[in-house]
Image (cartoon, rainbow, N blue to C red):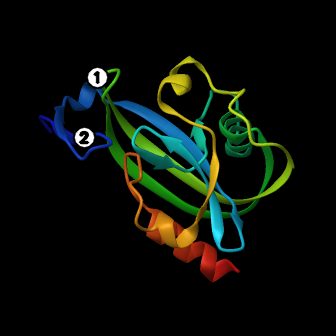
Amino acid sequence: MDSIITTDYYDNQYKADPDKVQPSIHVYGIVVDGDRALVSPQFDGYDWPGGTFRIGEDTIQTLKREFKEETGLDVEPIKLLDVETSLFHHPKRGTDHHSILIYYLVKVTGGKITDAGFDVDEKEYARLAEWVPIVNLRKMRHACSIDVTDKLLDLVEDYE
């Protein structure tokens, strides 16, 4: 294989050398309260709260740490919802990634919404987490390497 195609948040395509593509694992939490869900506004859209797996963590540790950093809230997983794969081009770094994206349905167990846990990069592109009507989520721009909003929300509805 000479090259693969990766995409960024805006669906721009990039030719990538497979030998230079970096593997990455990301874990996200979906929390629903009645007819609304918590999202993390990022760039010119939103993403689900969560982020990058660190060596030595399991996926639940990553989920809890990342959710807390991005929202200020403590969560517990209820159910594994979905696992997806994407080929992503990071526009800021100019790097290409073969990402595994893991999504859990979660419940909030404590904390309060804050941006105090944002790292240096997140302070540039992320804003305070907010509750959004689910009906609006299906129309909003998802600032992630793939948009699985409809699929995830359908899985949440099926669980309830």
Q: Position of residue 10 (x, y in %)?
A: 27, 44
Q: In the image, what residue occupies the spot 47% across and 35% down?
A: 24
Q: Position of residue 96 (x, y in %)?
A: 31, 30
Q: In the image, what residue occupies the spot 49% across and 64% down?
A: 137
Q: Position of residue 36 (x, y in %)?
A: 64, 67
Q: What is the three-letter code of the residue carrying label 1?
A: Gly
125 left or right, relative to 120: left
Query: Are the residues tagged 2 and 1 within 8 Å (C-beta)?
Result: no
Q: Farthest right residue?
A: 110
* SS category of the residue bearing label 2: strand
Q: Which mark is residue 6?
A: 2
88 left or right, relative to 35: left
22 left or right, relative to 118: left
Displayed quadrant of residue 18: top left
Q: Which mark is residue 94?
A: 1
The quadrant of the picture occupied by the C terminus is bottom right
Q: Farthest left residue?
A: 2
Displayed quadrant of residue 38: bottom right
Spatial CA span between label 2 and label 1: 11 Å
The quadrant of the picture occupied by the N terminus is top left
36 left or right, relative to 60: left
Compared to residue 10, the image places residue 157 above or below, namely below
Tag 1 or tag 2, which sits nearer the N-term?
2
Q: In the image, what residue occupies the spot 20% across and 28% down?
A: 17
Image mark count: 2
Q: In the image, what residue occupies the spot 60% across and 34% down?
A: 53
Q: Position of residue 150 (x, y in %)?
A: 45, 70
In the foreground, 150 or 123: 123
* SS category of the residue bearing label 1: loop
Q: Which mark is residue 4?
A: none
In the foreground, 84 or 74: 74
